[in-house]
Image (cartoon, rainbow, N blue to C red):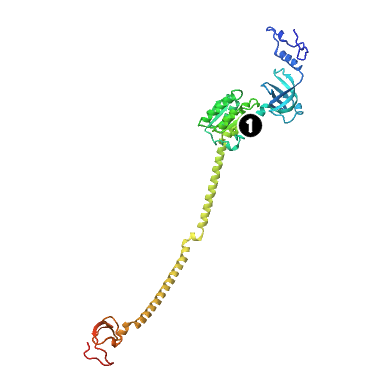
């Protein structure tokens, strides 16, 4: 068997496998191959590397993540045991640029290659995270994250537009939970790539198509989470601006609670999971029925209370004496009216009597002063032809025609001139 040396110049173990000794009729086992690779890898010493943290998942106190080269797309997986984690900064997170001391490790059982981290520290903000933060600040300055521009979700959408991966768990979660809440809910689903180079153009096209459909009332973009590297498409500026320009309300259900692509900020509603998106978009029919039943019961109670109150008030009014015997209120009033009428009549009669008495007295006074009363006593009034009253004998010279008015009528006469008192003129006409 031909031997070979490791990177440190040491020969491999005696039972290791060399490619030059491998033949079709004498193949080696997978276990022996993995043991050879492990023995070779274990001879590598620890190395300090510079990179950007693109994944940071904590499970059972241990950290499993990925480091990406700051200038290329090269990346490696790493693990950080809980005992080592206690000796590194607590604020390490995705997007940080770090230097880490790593040692290669190869698992025989699974054939997985990874690096174990023994030390790690900050060196700055990762290039990728820095670019995303600059874009986030630019979009925020433009007002795309303002709450005032976010559109409200419809109470019960007629059709839900769903953008997700084909045969994905996210699609199943949205559909299942939406149908459980409202069995007659309808979907228009467009399947797209949810990571990689096709993610952005396909998602943009799906948003444009669903936004132009007048039947679609709300759009859900759903993905079942993932490491930040796979979620980069949902922070692409082209997709973000397409979502911002859409007229239909859009719900972002991209990742889990700790995932935060820029799409979450510009969408009208951010859902923590696809299940949460379904709950936010579709009302629960059982809950709505309970609300309707509660409102009906409350209205029935209020109406019953109002009717009972009005009946009690009506009964109270009917027990009052004036309503129990209306005539009892009219009788004393009718007597008062009769007395008032009688008193009025008496006053009127008295006033008429007094007026009649005064009239008779005045009539008598007038008669006493009237010339007709004087004429009744035998006196007469003589008037010349010119209408003047004869008050002096000289006013009626001899031959003067006069009109004599007596108590009953008048007659004409001609004056014989003045005579002495007590002498009756002869030949007087």
Q: Residue 395, how many percent across, how many down?
A: 28, 86
User: Of residues 199 and 181, which is closer to you in this image?
Assistant: 199
Task: Locate residue 71, reporting x and y percent.
Answer: 68, 22
Residue at 25%, 89% in the rendered image: 417
Residue 128, quarter of the rendered image: top right
Q: Residue furthest right?
A: 10
Residue wearing tag 1: 136
Which residue appears farthest toward the left when viewing the image?
427
Secondary structure under tag 1 reads helix
Q: Position of residue 100 (x, y in %)?
A: 74, 24
108 or 86, which is in the foreground? 86
Local packing at callout 1 (Cα closer than 10 Å; few below 14, some 14-19, many 20+) is: many
Splitting the image into 4 quarters, where does residue 283 fall? top right
Question: x, y (%) of residue 415?
Answer: 24, 87
Which quadrant would the C terminus be assigned to in this image?
A: bottom left
Task: Evaluate whether residue 375 shows in this view.
Answer: yes
Front residue of this view, candidates 357 and 371: 371
- Whether residue 187 is visible to the viewer of this picture, yes or no, is no
């Amino acid at each position: 068997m031909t031997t070979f040396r490791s990177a440190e110049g040491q020969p491999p173990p005696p039972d290791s496998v060399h490619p030059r000794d491998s033949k079709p009729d004498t193949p080696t086992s997978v276990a022996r191959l993995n043991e050879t690779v492990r023995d070779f890898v274990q001879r590598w010493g620890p190395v300090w590397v510079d990179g950007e943290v693109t994944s940071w998942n904590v499970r059972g106190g241990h950290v499993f993540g990925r480091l990406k080269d700051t200038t290329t797309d090269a990346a490696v997986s790493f693990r950080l045991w809980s005992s080592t984690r206690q000796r590194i900064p607590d604020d390490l997170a995705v997007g940080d640029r770090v230097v880490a001391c790593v040692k290669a490790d190869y698992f025989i059982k699974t054939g997985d290659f990874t690096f174990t981290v023994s030390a790690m520290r900050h060196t700055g903000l990762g290039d990728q995270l820095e670019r995303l933060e600059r874009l986030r600040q630019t979009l925020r300055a433009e007002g795309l994250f303002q709450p005032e521009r976010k559109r409200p979700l419809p109470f019960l959408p007629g059709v839900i537009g769903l953008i997700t991966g084909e045969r994905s768990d996210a699609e199943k979660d949205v559909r299942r939970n939406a149908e459980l809440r409202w069995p007659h809910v309808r979907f228009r689903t467009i399947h797209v790539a949810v990571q990689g180079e096709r993610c952005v153009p396909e998602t943009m096209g799906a948003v444009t198509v669903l936004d132009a459909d007048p039947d679609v009332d709300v759009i859900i973009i759903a993905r079942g989470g993932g490491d930040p590297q796979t979620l980069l498409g949902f922070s692409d500026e082209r997709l973000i601006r397409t979502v911002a320009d859409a007229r239909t309300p859009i719900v972002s259900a991209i990742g889990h609670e700790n995932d935060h692509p820029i799409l979450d900020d510009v969408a009208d509603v951010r859902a923590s999971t696809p299940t949460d998106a379904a709950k936010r978009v579709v009302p629960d029919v059982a809950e709505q029925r309970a609300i309707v039943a509660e409102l009906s019961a409350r209205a029935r109670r209020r109406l019953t209370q109002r009717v009972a109150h009005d009946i009690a008030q009506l009964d109270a009014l009917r027990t009052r004496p004036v309503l129990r015997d209306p005539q009892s209120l009219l009788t004393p009033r009718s007597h008062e009216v009769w007395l008032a009428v009688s008193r009025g009549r008496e006053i009127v009669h008295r006033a008429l009597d007094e007026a009649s008495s005064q009239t008779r007295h005045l009539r008598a006074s007038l008669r006493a002063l009237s010339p007709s009363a004087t004429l009744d006593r035998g006196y007469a009034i003589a008037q010349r032809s010119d209408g003047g009253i004869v008050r002096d004998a000289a006013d009626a010279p001899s031959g003067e025609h006069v009109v004599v008015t007596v108590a009953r009528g008048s007659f004409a006469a001609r004056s014989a001139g003045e005579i002495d008192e007590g002498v009756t003129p002869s030949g007087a006409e």
